[in-house]
Image (cartoon, rainbow, N blue to C red):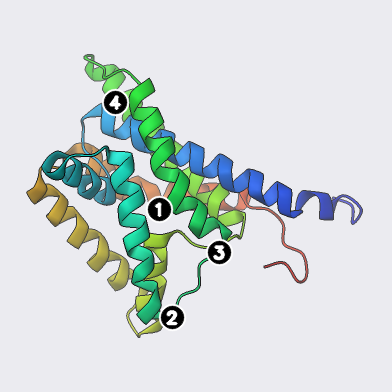
Amino acid sequence: MSELSLPAVTSFPNRLLRLYAGLALYGAGIGLQIESQLGNDPWDVFHQGLSIRFGLSIGTWIIIVGAAAMLLWIPLKQKPGVGTISNVIFLGLFADAAIWLAPTPDSPVVRWAYLLFAVVAIAAATALYIGAGLGPGPRDGIMTGLVRLGLSIRLARTLIEVTVLVIGFLLGGTVGLGTVVFALAIGPLTQFFMPRLSLPRTAGQD
């Protein structure tokens, strides 16, 4: 790629486009995984459990939990970016839209198709979102804050996700084979998509 074309590729509007495309795709993945009824990822087990127990839509709880997670950034000395704020506002809206638009399938084949597409979509969306370089998600910021306090990434992530999974399950969220598939596949798939969907970085880029 020539030097003349590089600034256009890494421009702020292009990064915003990647950010919002990633959030929309992530929301679609959340909606399809929930509609598959085969088991959600840990955070969405939690969001669904809150929705079942206390009312409001799953997307609304995604927004509420995201905003609450940002409050934990204060003692952890984390700083939000445009991507962080956008995640809080828009991810739940996209998830609710996907849940509303996607019919709940009766066929096991379609349910598994929903699940597998959802996991791939969330991995690709994560690469788009992170690759835009506009700030971590509110939930990821808790993990990086705990790492700053001395925990390993593996321990911090495990503690957070096991906690929300258990609480969500106790509240009535769906745990199943889909939860296991997500846990095993999301890391390798995200690693596959990251170098393919991340934007090239230029000197001085945030």
How crowded pointer 3 is (Cα within 10 Å; few <14, some 14-19, many 20+) is rated as some
- Which residue position is annotated with label 2? 77
- Which mark is first along the chain, 3 or 4? 3
| Residue 39 left/right relative to 82 | left
- Which residue position is annotated with label 4? 112
Nearer to us: label 2 or label 1? 2
Image coords of residue 94 (percent x, y): 44, 36
- Which mark is first along the chain, 3 or 1? 3
- Which residue position is annotated with label 3? 81
Element under disc 2? loop
Nearer to us: label 1 or label 3? 3
Name the foreground residue: 59 vs 18: 59
| Residue 157 left/right relative to 94 | left
Element under disc 3? loop
How crowded pointer 1 is (Cα within 10 Å; few <14, some 14-19, many 20+) is rated as few
- Which residue position is annotated with label 1? 187
User: In 3D space, how far apart are the residues under numbered discs 2 and 1 (Cα atoms)?
Assistant: 27 Å
User: In 3D space, how far apart are the residues under numbered discs 2 and 4 (Cα atoms)?
Assistant: 41 Å
Image coords of residue 188 (percent x, y): 43, 50
Q: Please indicate, yes or no, whether residue 120 appears anywhere in the rendered image.
A: no
Q: What residue is drawn where x is 39% and y is 73%?
A: 73
User: In 3D space, how far apart are the residues under numbered discs 4 and 3 (Cα atoms)?
Assistant: 35 Å
